Image (cartoon, rainbow, N blue to C red):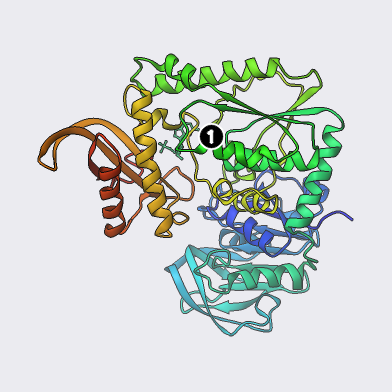
Amino acid sequence: MAQQTVLILDFGGQYKELIARRVRECNVYSVVKPGDRITVEQILEIGPIGIILTGGPNSVYEDGSPRCDKNIFKLGIPILGICYGVQLLAWSCGGTVAPCLVSEYGKTAMRVDTGSNLFKGLNAAQIGLMSHTDQIVKLPEGFRSVACTDNCPNAAIENKANRLYGMQFHPEVESTSRGTDMIHNFLYRVCGAEGDYDLHNLQEQLIRDIRDQVGDKHVLLALSGGVDSSVCAALLSRAIPGQLHCVFVDHGLMRKNEGDDVEAAFSGRDLHFIRVNAGERFLAALRGITDPEQKRKIIGAEFVKVFEEETEKLPDNVAFLAQGTIYPDVIESGGSKAATIKSHHNVGGLPDYVDFKEIIEPLRQLFKDEVRALGSELGLPENIVWRQPFPGPGLGIRVLGELTKEKLDLLRDADAIFREELHLAGLDREINQYFAVLTNMRSVGVMGDGRTYDYTIALRGVVTSDFMTAEWARIPYDVLDKVSRRIVNEVKHVNRIVYDITSKPPATIEWE
Ligand code: XMP
């Protein structure tokens, strides 16, 4: 039997991925599609057990606002509208939406009707995260209000007979403390979910799909050691043992011990692991180069050359190139005419034109945390599963200015101390990216009785969910103090440590 699916129609809201994640956490598979472009036929083809309409920044009564085909509301498929989604639902069914007299933002006290399917098993007093300037002022026929706040009489609505529901607040965010229970209620009490989506089934399904697609051909994967390519490698080696060739180009710009860690993680698996130690070659190509963009280009070009040289040595039956694309890279946003697909760095620096007959992307439907969970299930070590993002050009853009082996080694040691201390302080999962930078500034210091004239190391730590914007991490002073003392004491030619307290924008996360 086909897996049950909930369809999430996006109207430009910032929480679409979160809604999709919450649904999957309730053990129901979910997909996100642009709400203003999907047709009734396409919906019927997906055959969802329920549809969720997301929020969005527009006013539904204004021309040009993203809307869906009104026939969607007559399909008999259960629907839950959230924020803009509930306004769209009410407006499409003949209700009236207008600006609020008092806009509501933030955690708001609500009274919910515990007789409604949405709120069964909950207390009548609830907290919901509100963020709206419009609201439903007249309900469409057949609907009733099932929740209210002081300023919003229709904080949740239902039309039980037609299985149409909506919430003005956001059940998907943590500030709505029982929000996941409300989503669970919609899925299990209204949509008839059976909970057939879990990691084990998922892994079995992915393995079956890979075997169907690949047959007895062989697959090539450029392994960077990042989470996505590593999980991809582990999954493929489980699905098609002996048919996978992983090329790991060690460009000598990895962090301390990283190349060996990657190799160790894959040594016991049933795959052809090819490590190319190309550090000297990369350094030679980068000699005398100081401009960051030029460094990136040279590293990218050199990577392609090494990769191509290796692929020429592979057997002829290698017909597929595997890529670690994940779901957030694939989702198209709704609420705009032009499809905006998140552009992402090409981590390994592989060109788009690599000449392979077919591409295989086994993680295409997974979110990052599902990829990590799958990696653990497949027995990958913690340091790989929880690896923070690392730029393709590696330490090449963290040693500012010209690269030398000595500078890279110095940075590796300082960076390893910083990472170790953050790990010991239990901060390594809440700070999304952290690293040391070797500045090309030297300054005067005093050590023992002598004057020194040595390098400055900058530490960087950021908290971010999308890496497009980021806050500098408030690392406790005593942790910074310990890191600073250790680096200066343990790493030669460093006599000064600074901590970067700029957010992005205006700064970027990397220094180059
Ligand atoms: P910035 O410095 O632009 O970084 O704020 C945003 C995120 O992208 C990573 N980054 C790169 N990743 N190749 C990559 O694969 C690159 O050239 C590159 N430059 C930056 C950076 O580490 C951060 O996660």
**Depth check, front residue: 144 or 416:** 416
Q: Is 264 rendered above or below residue 177?
A: above
Q: Amino acid at mark 1?
A: Gly
Residue at image coords 77%, 65%: 195
Q: Residue furthest right?
A: 1
* Percent position of residue 429, x then y: 48, 55
Q: Residue furthest front?
A: 449
Q: Quadrant of the N terminus?
A: bottom right
Give residue 68's position: percent from left, percent from top: 67, 50
Note whether ligand 1 is within 8 Å of mark 1.
no
Residue 424 picture quarter:
bottom left
| Residue 485 as seen in the image, left or right of residue 28 | left
At x 76%, y 56%, the residue is 200
Total numbered labels placed on residues in the image? 1
Occupied quadrant, residue 500: top left
Locate the C terminus and report the quarter of the image it occupies: top left
Q: Nearer the viewer, residue 56 or 444?
A: 444
Q: Which residue lies at the image location 15% right of the left edge and 34% below the top edge?
A: 452
Tell me the element at label 1: helix
| Residue 187 in the image: above or below residue 268 | below
Is residue 194 something one can see in this rendering?
yes
Residue 443: image x %, image y %? Answer: 16, 34
Q: Nearer the viewer, residue 59 or 320?
A: 320
Image quadrant assignment for residue 238: top right
Q: Quadrant of ligand 1?
A: top left
Q: Residues within 10 Å of mark 1 (few under 14, many from 20)?
A: many
Residue drawn at x 57%, y 42% as measured from the top left: 336
Q: Does any portion of residue 330 appear in the rendered image?
A: no
Q: Residue 323 at what x, y percent from top left?
A: 67, 33
Residue at label 1?
259
